[in-house]
Image (tube, rainbow, N blue to C red):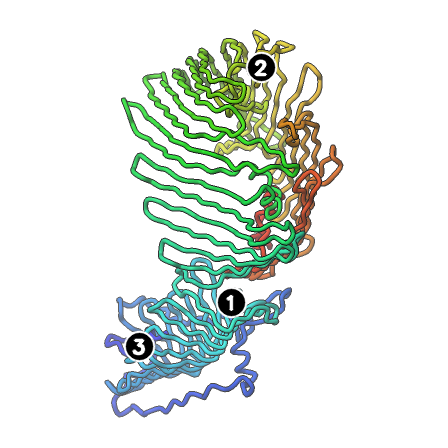
Amino acid sequence: MVLALSVGFGAGGAYAQNASLPQPADYEPVRVTPPAVQSGENRRPADQDKLSLGDTCLFCQHQASEANKQPEIKRSGEEPLPQDYTRVIADKVAGQSKVAVRAEGDVIIERNQEVLNADWADYDQTSDTVRAGDRFTLYQDGSTVSGDTLVYNLKDNTGSSEYVRVDAEKDGRRLQSVSEKAEMKGKGLYKLINTKFNTCSPGDASWFIKAKSIETDQETGIGVAKDASLVFGGVPVLYTPWADFPLNGHRKSGLLVPTLATGSDGLELALPYYFNLAPNLDATFRPGIISSRGVQLGGQIRYLEPKFNGVIDGDWMPHDKKRHENNRYQIKFDHNHQLTDKLSGGINFNQVSDDNYYRDFYGREDIASNVNLNRQLWLNYGDNIWGGSFDGALNVQKYQTLANQNGYKDEPYAIMPRLTGRWQKTIGKANINVFSQFTRFVHDSKQDGSRTVLYPSVRWDFNNQWGYIRPKIGVHATYYDLGSFGNQSSRRVSRVLPIFNVDTGMTFERNANVFGKAYLQTLEPRLFYNYIPTKSQNDLPNFDTSENSFSYNQLFRENLYVGNDRINSANSLTAAAQTRFLNPNNGAELFRAGIGQKFYFKNDNVLLDGSVGRYERSQSDWVGFAHGKLSDSIHAGFDIHYNQNESRAESYAATVRYNPEPGKVLSARYKYGRNERIYLQSDGNYFYDKIRQIDLAAQWPIRKNLYAVTRYNYEIQAKKPLEILVGAEYKSDCGCWSASLVGQRYVTGENSRKNAVFFNLQLKDLSNLGNNPFEKLRLAIPGYSKTNEVVTP
């Protein structure tokens, strides 16, 4: 604003159009007396309109009135001027050189990218003062500033303007404000009196920030608001006597928006405070209270350096009234470090005070995924050695295992340490792979020991556009050094097994037409032969090995087990085929389906306990799948594991989702398992049983801008719901605010449940108030879209 006025009258190179050139005798001094700022009680209705952002109605379609419309900028329409030249257009331009200049009637001043419109404008060169009125509008760098009168001293950068309105847009974000008075107190120092602002469309004042004054200092980059309040729907809902904030988008220390939630533990309130300690270091302190439990203190520290970064997070509750326990806490530490170009490392550490911590303070998904809390230190190394690539890793890991609700837990072995190396090199069609690993396993209640693995292999890759053949041969050698434990004496034992397999496949393509639409369809048959001799392994410990679930991908793995303690015997052939439907224009995959089965040439197999068992038939169960888009709005998926010998399904899952547009989704899922792991028993073994679960979810508009969200996850076998979620979300017509209210009830154990209520008010491009349920809804409803981002016609 100041720049445009100063260059408009202070530059030597100026053009005046639509007016005769003034002569010294033509100049007549003009007295400009700006009206005094009136108090709120005596302010005229017309002046009050100038201080209005628009309609405060929450559910109206806002239309900008003449008072709060963004002013239009009048331009000359002439060719652009050279850099730093000024064009002045007015009905009349008069003045005296080096004394004063006055322009009257539709004043347009253009210089570089700035444009100023005014009814009249004066420049007193003797006092270096600019005055403009009765209305002025300035466009500068994407912002429009308008007001009644302007008085500004170019020498000391001081002045004032009355009834000022600002409309600014940058990077897709909008800001509008109205102020009774704006004072310029020196270079970079400004003060707004009786001001309001929000980030809504013109005419929308459904919410705004109101302050008695806002003072800004461009040099320090800090603004201070006094007597500020958040007004929502015309009603003040939050107030602060004082608040400071950054002007340049940089971080600044200060209070953050409170978080509020309610549920089984009553009201939960946290008042976080942010510390901007350095450009690469910050911290957050989170004091809070849970009404049924007590005071909780939390915090987080984040740091970032060119070579390393990390986060330290923790919470502490001195006394839990509900559990009658003291000093309940959690600690999370994550650090990543690039030591050299070839060497990196890190630490991941998690710990809680007790087994019930996640059940008491977290939701269903967190409870299920945090049984074994990771505590790990690692180093990774990568380099080119002997013409090939080498990757090495050093790892130390010990979990904190949380007991289930009945007090039982299955604690994994600690790794103290593990050293892994892999070297690979391609020579012609052959890929040489040498894998080696040493691990020391430690456990408080099981036999300790070390395991050394060496697995060299060679795989050839013969391929062309329509098929491939990939034979592989290798030798898997394992050596154990076991310590004494109880009645078990220390011993050394080893196992050496050759491994041979051939993976081959072909791809056929054709143009297909389904329901009037053109596709490119593939047919991809695949064979996988695998041979591993039978060797009993019941004299070997099981430190970290488990069996893979039976799936389509499992048909093509050489080992049924994850880990190196068990290697299955094999003399089998997998026969499978899949088909894909592709978009013929861009090759995008739209649908995929496949089926496969394994045929045994011998019926013995190594079981998880190391003993040798016998297959009862010469072929495995078969597995099939189908996933993809049935139409532009319907997605479907189906997976099945079928026991052909028993003529029954061992497990299957089906899902269908109708998603015609963002914000509209209906989802149904069904899952069946005949023999699934349910819970850990007192003897250390898991209880297995049948599961049958139905999962229904939806997000759907029930009226304009109002969406219902729901999920119902029910366990048919146990005859009880696992999770019930229901809520509503609203987005204002102009998209300036949105609100969510969601209730959730979910199981936390075999006989325990919790409730939670989430309320969130989101103010566009400003902040969130409450507890945002987005992550809960994203996990609960497949295809869920953020309501405030849904574009409605």
Q: Quadrant of residue 387?
A: top left
Tell me where residue 323 appears, x and y as whole percent.
64, 49
Indicate which label's residue lies in the foreground, 3 or 1: 1
For badge 3, the amino acid type reads Ser
Q: CA distance from mark 2 to mark 3?
A: 85 Å
Res 688 seen here: yes
Q: Nearer the viewer, mark 2 or mark 1?
A: 2
How many residues crowd mark 1 within 10 Å: few (<14), some (14–19), many (20+)? many
**Visible residue check, residue 204:** no
Which residue is disc 1 drawn over? 198
Question: How far apart in space, not on screen, are marks 2 and 1 (Cα)?
Answer: 65 Å
Residue lying farthest front? Answer: 487
Q: Which residue is mark 3?
A: 6
> Which residue occupies the extreme top position in the image?
602
Q: Earlier in the sequence, mark 3 or mark 1?
A: 3
Residue drawn where x is 41% and y is 20% of the image: 452
Name the residue at 45% across, 45% down. 333
Q: Sequence-wise, which precedes: disc 2 or disc 1?
A: 1
In the rendered image, residue 723, in percent from the top left (x then y), is placed at 68, 43
**Of the residues shown, which amino acid type is indicated by label 2?**
Lys
| Residue matched to label 2 | 598
Secondary-structure class at tag 3? helix
Q: Left or right: where does residue 638 sit relative to residue 387?
A: right
- Name the element at disc 1: strand
604 versus 455 height, above or below: above
| 483 left or right of 369 in image | left
Look at the numbered discs 3 and 1 and tell me whether their residues touch, using CB distance below 8 Å.
Answer: no
Q: Nearer the viewer, residue 34 or 439?
A: 439
Residue 765 drawn above or below residue 384: below
User: Closest to the observer: 410 or 128?
Assistant: 410
Three-letter residue code for mark 1: Asn
Name the image quarter holding the N terminus: bottom left
